[in-house]
Every structure is written in structure tokens, then in C-alpha cells.
Image (tube, rainbow, N blue to C red):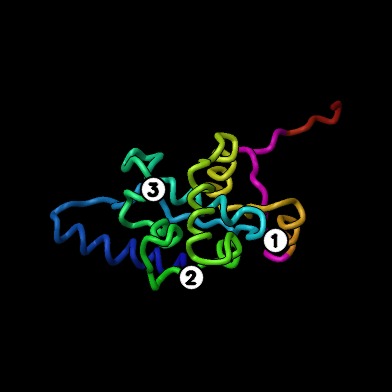
Amino acid sequence: MSRAMGWVGQSYVQAFNLRHARCGALWQGRFKSCLVQSERYLLTVMRYIELNPVRAAMVETPEDFRWSSVHTHLARARDPLITPHPLYLALGNDQAARAHAYKRWLDAGIAPDDLQHLRAYARQERALGDERFQRMVQTTLGRPATCRPRGRPRLVSPQD
């Protein structure tokens, strides 16, 4: 995914800028990815993503945003690019029940603390999950999996 986004950033953006006589980036920042523990956080991340256009004041409801997976999750459209996750499928016995349950979940919104938590993990591209999941990811990948405070760690003097 990172290589594909890099290609888009190098090829498509150059062509777009040339065609429209402009320069600079089309997007605010670098593409971010975050490993997510499905069982615990997947539906929360889906809700976070589908509410982004509302938080950005682009639309009043998630359903008003044309380029969203919310239309598939609410059974208002079928997009062949979207494969429903088993956790989404477990929301109900049929498409209507799942759409109804997901709509209630979506309408509940995201608490400010959860929003801050999700943003921190996405910004630092850390593994979003419980402590056991983060330890497994850290051991497997050999890199930090939890969020760390900005800046260098404070030096501890020998007297402390």
C-alpha cells in the first residue's frame, strides 16, 4: 500500500499539476497506516474513517459524502471494491439487520478521548490494540508498537 501511495504521489500528482497549471501537493501529508487489532478496534476505526468528512465540515452526515464506504455498510449501495469484514457481518443475520445495527453504531459517534487515541496511533503509525497485541507486534516486527511522547526521553541523573 505504501508503494502504491508513493507511486500516486509521484506520478498522478505531477500529471494533475501539469494539467491544471499548478504546483505542490494534493494532499495535506504523507499517507499513514496503522495496524489494527480487528476484534477490538476494527468497527471503531471504520466509524472514525466514515465520520471524517463530517468532522471536516465537508458534509452534514456520513451518507452525504459520495466517496465513502458508508453506503455499502448501510446497504444503500454495493461497491465491488469493498469486502465486508467478518465483524461487520456479525452485526446481524441479514443485510438489513447489519445496516440497522451499523447505523446505530455510526450515529453514536466517537468520544473525544477515543478520537484523540485513534489520531495518536495513526499519526505515529503504531499498532492499535490491547497490550498483548502490541507486545506480539513489537516482537514480530522488531519495532515499537505503542505510542510514545514526542521528543527525546528525559535523561535521568544518577541521584534520582
Q: Residue at x 17, y 52 (%)?
A: 22
Q: Secondary structure at mark 2?
A: loop
The three-letter code of the residue at mark 3 reads: Pro
Kind of residue at disc 1: Val
Q: Nearer the viewer, mark 2 or mark 1?
A: 2
Q: Nearer the viewer, residue 73 or 32?
A: 73
- The quarter of the rendered structure image containing the C terminus is top right
As drawn, the label of residue 83 is 2
Q: Relative to 137, does residue 124 appear above or below in the rendering?
A: above
- 111 drawn magenta: no
Dot 1: what SS?
A: helix
- The location of residue 4, given as percent across then percent down, is 41, 69
Query: Where does label 3 land, which residue?
Result: 62
Q: Which residues are magenta?
A: 140-154
Gap between marks 2 and 1, in whole Å? 25 Å
Quote the CA–CA distance across marks 3 and 1: 32 Å
In this view, 106 is above or below 13: above
Q: Nearer the viewer, residue 89 or 18?
A: 89
Front-most of residues 6 and 71: 71
Residue 41 is situated, as x and y percent measured from the top left of the image, at 62, 53
Q: Position of residue 91 (x, y in %)?
A: 58, 59
Nearer-N-terminus badge (2/1): 2
Observer-nearest residue: 130 or 4? Answer: 130
Say which quarter of the image contains residue 134: bottom right
Q: Dominant secondary structure of the magenta stretch? A: loop
Q: Earlier in the sequence, mark 2 or mark 3?
A: 3
Q: Tell me the residue that label 1 is attached to.
A: 137
Residue at 56% across, 36% down: 111
